[in-house]
Amino acid sequence: MKSNLRFAVVGNGFWANYQIAAWKEVAGVDLVAVHDSVKSKAENIAHKFGVARVYEHVEDLLKKERLDFIDIITGVDTHAPLAEMGARHGISVVCQKPMAPKLHVAQQMVENFERLKIPLYIHENWRWQTPIRKLKEMLDNTSIGKIFKARVTFCSSFPVFENQPHLAELEEFILTDIGSHILDVCRFLFGEVESLICHIARVNEKIKGEDVANVFMRMKTGMTCYAEMSYASLLEFESFPQTFILVEGERGSIHLMKDYVLHVTTDSGTEIISAQPMEYPWADPKYSVVHSSIVECNRNILGGLTAAAPAETTGKDNLETVRLVHASYTSARTNRLIDMHTF
């Protein structure tokens, strides 16, 4: 009988509460220690989840614990150095998105882990949302024919800065934060990008970065995909954190709409399919579709860690999403089309 994988969580802020709760839904892992540079945060998390040991210094954690992997849940600027520390100790790494603040840093991370033959996974959970997985299944099996265009929408006025105030201080905000998710969903559903053009705006004068981004992509399949993101959209229905997706094919369309309902329309009519996410007692009702996707993302990564099944969101795969984020910023700054073959 195989023993559970032993892991530690590095970083005990807002998202650690849900990441740890999600790991506890997955059989085959034991959380043996937590770390935070603010020791009281680590102590609070350890008390909440019954974790035996607390560390204030990462090196102490890595030297003293026998670990199969670490889960890094910290600010983006710390991802690369913390991941490299884990790699130096021969420990597999799971890291929150975005992988790194700069493209060349993300590229170096992936190269270093590949050279050392140590697994690196990025916790890109958005593609694991129940309605998005259902949409992908339908695209693979439906009769709407060859897809020629799609629109992926994440627009709301949800006060995201209230529970994550550090986001208001980012010089680059929505594309690195929600854009990492949305552009990854575009890749997951429709494949890789051939070229893109992006426009951004800052509507909220109290923040430093952009809170609106529109990315128009030509995919390698020949279809076009429009991704629109906003935290400045005061709409009739506040839909946070739902993602709406409209896909059009030669013989019909699939529309992921409000409250996780998909409308499949062909010349024979419209079929309505519900894709409700799992609800967990620890999940914040405002984030239920997101929090349930963390469980499925963790489960998939565990499959990669144990070699039971390939994991989707490897460092190498997620690097393509990081490239899209930085290509979008380059396009917005220069007001030009970016060829992803040469970017």
Image (cartoon, rainbow, N blue to C red):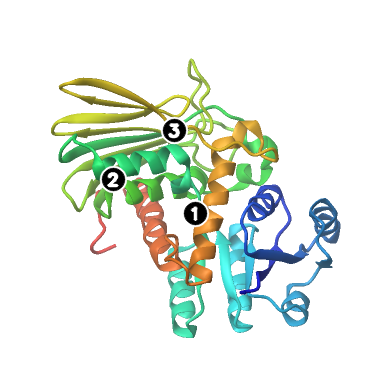
Name the residue at 55% across, 31% down.
Answer: 204
Residue type of the residue flagged with mark 2: Ile
Examine the rendered structure and indicate whether residue 42 appears above or below residue 151: below
Give the quarter of the figure containing the C terminus.
bottom left
Residue type of the residue flagged with mark 3: Ala
Is residue 213 shown to the viewer in this render? yes
Name the residue carrying label 1. 124
Answer left or right for 159 relative to 307.
right
Name the residue carrying label 3. 275
Spatial separation of the CA atoms under disc 1 and disc 3: 20 Å
Q: Circle 3: is it few (<14), some (14-19), or many (20+) Cα within 10 Å?
A: some
In contact (CB < 8 Å): disc 1 and disc 3: no
Examine the rendered structure and indicate whether residue 116 appears above or below residue 214: below
Query: Closest to the observer: 159 or 141?
Result: 141
- Percent across and percent down for residue 342 are 24, 64
Residue type of the residue flagged with mark 1: Glu
